Every structure is written in C-alpha cells, then in structure tokens.
Image (tube, rainbow, N blue to C red):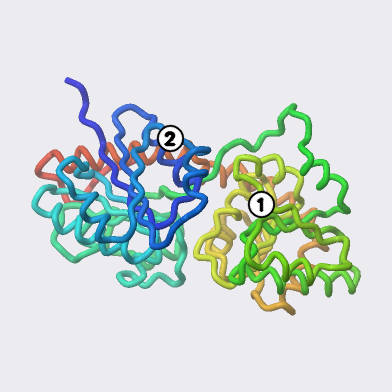
Amino acid sequence: MKPAATRWVILAGGLSPYTLELWERVASQPGQKVALFHIRRAPRTDFEHEKGQMIARRVRVTEIRGAAQAARVALRPTAMIPDVLVCYGHSPVYNLASSILAQLQRKARCVAYASDANGIAKLAEPPRAMTEIVLLARRAVIGRTFDVAFTLGLSNSIAHGLSGIGKLVPIPLLGVPEDVAPTEAAPSALERRIAELQPPVIAAVARLSPEKNLASLVRAWRSARGTGTHGSLVLVGEGPERSMLDSLAAGEPSIQFLGAVPYWQMGPLFRRFDALVLPSLVEPWGIVVTEALCHGIPVLASSQVGSATSLAAEAPGAVMIVDADERMLEFGLAAFLAQIEKHKEAARQAAPRIRGMYGMQSIADRLVQFGISVRDLRRAGDAPADGVTTC
C-alpha cells in the first residue's frame, strides 16, 4: 500500500522567495503535499515576478485578498485538511488559523500549528518578539484539550517563554540557501566594483525604508570616518529613502549604493563583504543576519534585530550588538572595525554550525520527518500524550 501523504497548509501574509523555496523543497520530497495561501492586505507589484523566478512548481500557490476570501478558499471541500498548519504574517492570518483549527477539532486527534513569535506573544509573552517560527498544537493556540502539543523554535528565550505548553522540536522555518562555496565563474560587475573599494567593506543589506534606520547609519559612518575609521560602507537595496540617503552620503566616497540585488545573486556578494551591519529600529527576525553568518561574515546589529540577539550565543565573537541610536552606532562601528579580523575569524569558525541550523535543505529534511511524525500520530487515533518521538 502506498504510504499516506503528509498534508501541509501554509497561510502567508508575506511571501518572500526564501519562503517559497523552502516549501518547494519540502514538496519535492516523496509523500509531501503543500498548499500555500498568500493572504494579501494590499496589492503587491513584485509577487508575480518573484513567483515566476522562484518556482512554484510543486507547491500549489493561491493568491487571495483578505481573511474573508481566505476562509472561503481554504475551507472548500477540495482544500486539504492539513496534518500541519503553518502561519506567517499578520492578524488576518492568525484569525483564519484559529477558525481552521476550531473546525479541525472534529476531524483530527493531532494537528500541529506553526506561527511566528508575533503570533504567540499573546499566549506565552516571550522576552522579546522574534520572527522565528514556533510550532504549537491547538491546545496552545485556542485552549482546547488536545493529545499532543509541539513547539518549534531554536531561540532559548522563546523556549523559556513557552515552557510547559508543548514539546520543543528544534527546527526553524526560516532558512537560507547553502551555496556558500566560491565558484569558478568570472566575477560579476558588482563583485568587481566591491573588490575595488577600500577594505574592510561593511555592507547594509536592507530595504531603504525608515525602520531600517539607515540614515542614522550613514551619519554615524561619516562621524566615525572623521575620527579615523577606515573602510567602505555599501548599501544594498532600494526603497523610499533612497533620495534622502543619497543626499546624506553626498561627498563621502567611502559610501556606495549598489541598488536592489536579486536574492539568488547575493551569495557571491557576501563572499566579497568583510562584515554586515543592520541597525534596524524594528526587526523581528532579519534573515540577512542568518545569511551573513552562514557565509562566515561577522555582524554588527542593533539590539532590535531578533536574529542577531538570538544567534549571538551560537556564534560567539561573530556578532556585536549595539543600541540603535546614532551615537552608539558610531562607537560600535569604530570598535567593531578595530577588531574586524578577530570578528571575521569567529564568524568563519561559527559558519558550519549556523549552516547546520539554518541551511534550507537541512530544514526541509527535518520538516519532512516532523510532518511524518505528526501525520502518523494524527491518524493513529489514540496518540499518546507523552513520550512523542519526532525528528
């Protein structure tokens, strides 16, 4: 008899190429069925381009507007009743997830639920919000009796905040491509441009928008340069603050703008950077920090960047945390670059461990095994409440 498939339903308020690729990798493995519902609150001009470039070959992607339409689509008889329900994003997603879980109460003994830290903050009040995915059974979401509860996350702070409401399963749902090895391909024009800059080259890879705090970074960089700091600052990205940042950087040749770079072209650029800086005022997770550490690149980040604060212990010496205000950024830049070789060596040492935790194929493989465990428990009828073995 052919083994039953594991059925995943993904509710996504935002949809990045990395999200699509992770679930494409899950769906490419035998016995995995993935349906992804992209629940939009506003039109997105780039989604069709991302989807076309990215792949929804095996993942069934449905774009819908608002929670009301999502409820009609997701709960049609033709939609899958999931073994695992995964949620990324805003409140309409979580409201719909609760509705689906309530309906599943009559149909399943064991369902796993995934949400980011914003979604569980009301339940567990973790020390700080991080967009690290957490897997919970319905008991942790809507308070109903349930056989088995699962918690998915890597952060010690989240694990502490969730103690007592689930079984910890250490798998993140945010991964990065594993392509970190140098290639024989000729350097691109952007790589050649970076190679010509004065080292060390510190890069800010972010949307040029107010919450990224890049104006403070540019001013802090100029001040640090005035007190003897050497090197180059590269801003990678586009956004509404581009003109303002151009004006702030005018007359300072050590500041360069590279514009927007597609994610699949970032690997070679990371290998040209000496460090990453992310001074955000608000950054629940920040996948670019994970990318940098996977490439062995040290990170200077504000205390508001969830991935930096979470992974500092996993990459000792490779991550420096500073306050987000301009003066502290100036001091932080000077201190960080004064010890750049030490930070780079720490990042190189930590890179294999971070890749093992956040490499996309590794995450996909672990998710598949976890999904099989949930599926088997759900269909067993009498799932034990304790002693559950997952992956």
Q: Nearer the viewer, residue 131 or 93?
A: 93
Disc 1 vs disc 2: which is toward the camera? 1
Disc 1 is placed on an element classified as: loop
Which numbered disc flags the more N-terminal residue, 1 or 2? 2
Where is residue 373? Give x, y as percent.
Answer: 26, 39
Q: CA distance from mark 1 to mark 2?
A: 26 Å
- The residue wearing badge 2 is 25
Which quadrant of the view contains residue 141? bottom left
Which mark is drawn over residue 366? none
Q: Which residue is mark 1?
A: 260
Expressed as whole percent of the image width and height from the top left, the position of residue 92 reads 31, 64
Considering the numbered disc 2 on the image, is that residue within a helix, a strand or a loop? Answer: helix
Look at 45% across and 46% down and name the residue there: 19
In this rendered view, identify the residue nearer to me: 116 or 374.
116
The residue that appears at 26% across and 64% down in the rendered structure is 95
> What amino acid type should be assigned to the residue bearing mark 2?
Arg
